[in-house]
Amino acid sequence: MGFVTAALEALTTRGRSFVAAGFTAVVCSFLLGERDLLRAGLLILLLPLISALAVSRTRYRLACARRLWPSRLPAGHEARADLRLENVSKLPSGLLLVEDRVPFTLGGRARFVLDRIEPHGFRELSYRLRSDVRGRFRVGPLTVRLADPFGLVELARSFSLTDTLTITPRIVDLPSQRMLTSWDGDGESRSRAIAVGGEDDLAPREYRRGDDLRRVHWRSTARYGELMVRREEQQWQRRATLLLDTRRSAHPSEEAFELAVSVAASVGVHLAEEGLALRLATDAGREAAVSYSAGAESGGELLDALAVVSMSEERSFVPGVAALTGTGAGGVGGLVVAVLGRLTDEEAVTLAAAGGNAAPIALLTAGEGAQAAATLHAAGWRVLAPTSLEVLPSVWAGAGQ
């Protein structure tokens, strides 16, 4: 009974017409006493049910795979989605209507029509994805509608597989600066650190994930009861803190905020590629250590974080400044780069004292606040004012002067 109900629900307009015609023929055969009409009526009546049985068996013998290439890309660029649909049954499929659910921002749903897939055969499909808006978007699930060769039955099969496409802010390449190699991340020279600790510091330390097992110090391991390794070389890495002002009141428009995000992404990627350990902070004081792998398909945490950042309703800039002065987690030391919107004179005075050990850099993207720029400049900040992403490389080139 359940199969008959499901079959009737899956009937197309043509299939319902066949059922009505077959039922009418059967009734008329009894009224007229025509046995041949009964046979014809039963054939017409059973044909949609047989088709529904064949299609339902095929529906659960389809396999699907999807691949996004690349899975992360800047806004305004195109990605490609590759689909592979396989028929793992011993029967050929009927007509297939394939539809992959895609957010409207990426171009809307992708639809395909396949005549049939032979037993154990497959079809490969592809389509393009593009977005001018950054964010993280879910692609899928895939829905396949199967129809019999006569067009009597149509059943749907929905796969649960989904993939995520990350659209990052637009970035530009920035020129290298000599200033980035003139200091280390702790405000001390590397030679001084080595002079204090020695070139070959054999003091053991706790084992950390990723350490070479050949450096295990077994005597110390037995003494302390936990795995210890030899600390044979100084751990030294330059650091930088990237502060992004996300306050809605600091950005006159959405376009101005998107410019600030793109500037922060470009500068952050540049600093990471120069070898600096990067920390991202916002006006709310939230901090996170981020990384960027140059040339990797998946990119890094920096672009992931900036892909989904949005404007905040914060009014105070004090929590963001705390991330630079050391009251936040790990905010002390290293280069400070602040990407800012509009600043009041009071906020500029507060920020001016939070520059860190190296000469800090302020990028004012709102194109306003001459007094705030003068205050920061007087406190030793290098103040830059990129009016668009295209002029950022030339503006950044003047940071070392």
Image: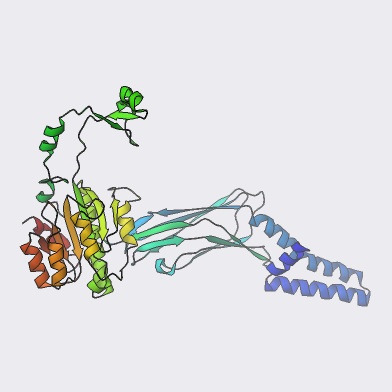
Query: Looking at the image, which residue is at 35% across and 29% down?
Result: 227
Q: How many marks?
A: 0
Left or right: 150, with 326 as reference point: right
Q: Colour scheme of this structure image? A: rainbow
Left or right of 170 in this view: 79? right
Q: Residue furthest right?
A: 33
Residue 246 location, x and y as percent?
Answer: 27, 66
Compared across the picture, whether 4 is left or right of 77 comes to: right
| Residue ranking furthest to the top | 219
- Viewport quadrant of the C terminus: bottom left
Q: Nearer the viewer, residue 286 or 65?
A: 286
Q: Quadrant of the N terminus?
A: bottom right
Q: Position of residue 342 (x, y in %)?
A: 18, 71
- Of 180 and 176, which appears nearest the observer? 180
- Is 164 left or right of 20, judged from the image as shown? left
Q: Residue at x 25, y 74 (%)?
A: 249
Say whether residue 181 is visible: yes
Q: Which residue is at 34% across, 56% downward? A: 304
Query: Taking the image as drawn, is residue 173 in sight?
Result: no
Find residue 110 and report its horizontal and vertical position in percent. Answer: 48, 65
Q: Which image quadrant for residue 231?
A: top left
Relative vertical location of residue 315 with respect to residue 285 in this rendering, above or below: below
Q: Choose top left, top right, bottom left or bottom right for residue 106.
A: bottom left
Camera-nearest residue between 286 and 340? 286
Is 163 situated above or below 154? Answer: above
